Image (cartoon, helix red, strand yellow):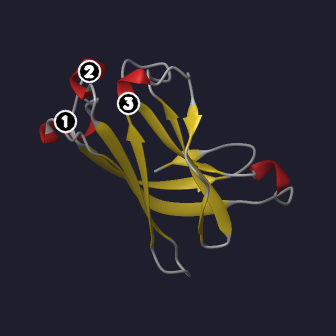
């Protein structure tokens, strides 16, 4: 696995630490938005999936979607999600350039950042 695609440290390495997750978004029109979601006692999370608080970037409301134990993979899975997408017009679509950063405060060598350009649409999703 490439260094920039490796999974974070096993959950046991995060005992007692917080897990800041950040999203940096750039849109063609509005200025960039920086959002930080801090999770405490990460290893004690029991939910299969959790959502961050909702934040606004451009004309859309966004949230982070996290699978602490992975989504068909071993390890943390993290996604940027359009909040309230079911309330948007029928043919809505949005392109977003963003980066997601997960910081391991115990061992920074397990921290990871990934930049993504993503096309959001209610019927299919494409990532570039």
Query: In the picture shown, does residue 112 fall above or below 94?
Result: above
Q: Position of residue 11 (x, y in %)?
A: 30, 21
Q: CA distance from mark 3 to mark 1?
A: 15 Å
> Is 65 placed left or right of 13 in the picture?
right
The residue lying at 37 percent from left, 31 percent from top is 41
* Mark 1, residue position: 110
Q: From the viewer's perspective, is 65 left or right of 115?
A: right
List the residue tagged with mark 3.
Answer: 42
Question: Looking at the image, is mark 2 or mark 1 earlier in the sequence?
Answer: 2
Q: Nearer the viewer, mark 2 or mark 3?
A: 3
In the picture, the disc for residue 60 is none
Against 75, is 94 above or below? below
Residue receiving disc 2: 10
- Identify the residue at image location x=55%, y=46%: 52
Residue 57 versus residue 72: which sits nearer the camera? 57
The residues bearing labels 2 and 1 have C-alpha atoms spaced at a distance of 9 Å
Question: Is disc 3 surrounded by few (<14), some (14 to 19) or many (20+) residues within 10 Å?
Answer: some
Which residue does the image show at 53% across and 62% down from the upper left?
Answer: 96
Identify the residue shown where x is 62% and y is 44%: 125
Compare residues 109 and 96 and report the one nearer the observer: 109
**Spot occupied by residue 5 in the image (x, y as percentages of width and height):** 28, 36
Q: CA distance from mark 2 to mark 3?
A: 11 Å
Contact (Cβ within 8 Å) of mark 2 with mark 1: no
């Amino acid at each position: 696995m490439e260094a920039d695609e490796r999974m974070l440290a096993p959950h046991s390495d995060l005992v007692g630490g917080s897990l800041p997750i950040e999203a940096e978004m750039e849109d063609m029109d509005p200025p960039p938005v920086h959002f930080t979601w801090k999770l405490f006692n990460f290893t004690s999370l029991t939910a299969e999936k959790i959502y961050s608080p909702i934040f606004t970037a451009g004309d859309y409301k966004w949230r982070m979607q996290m699978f602490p134990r992975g989504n068909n993979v071993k390890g943390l899975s993290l996604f940027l999600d359009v909040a309230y997408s079911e309330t948007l017009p029928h043919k809505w679509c949005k392109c977003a350039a963003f980066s997601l950063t997960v910081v391991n405060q115990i061992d920074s060598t397990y921290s990871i950042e990934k930049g993504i350009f993503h096309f959001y649409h209610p019927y299919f999703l494409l990532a570039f």
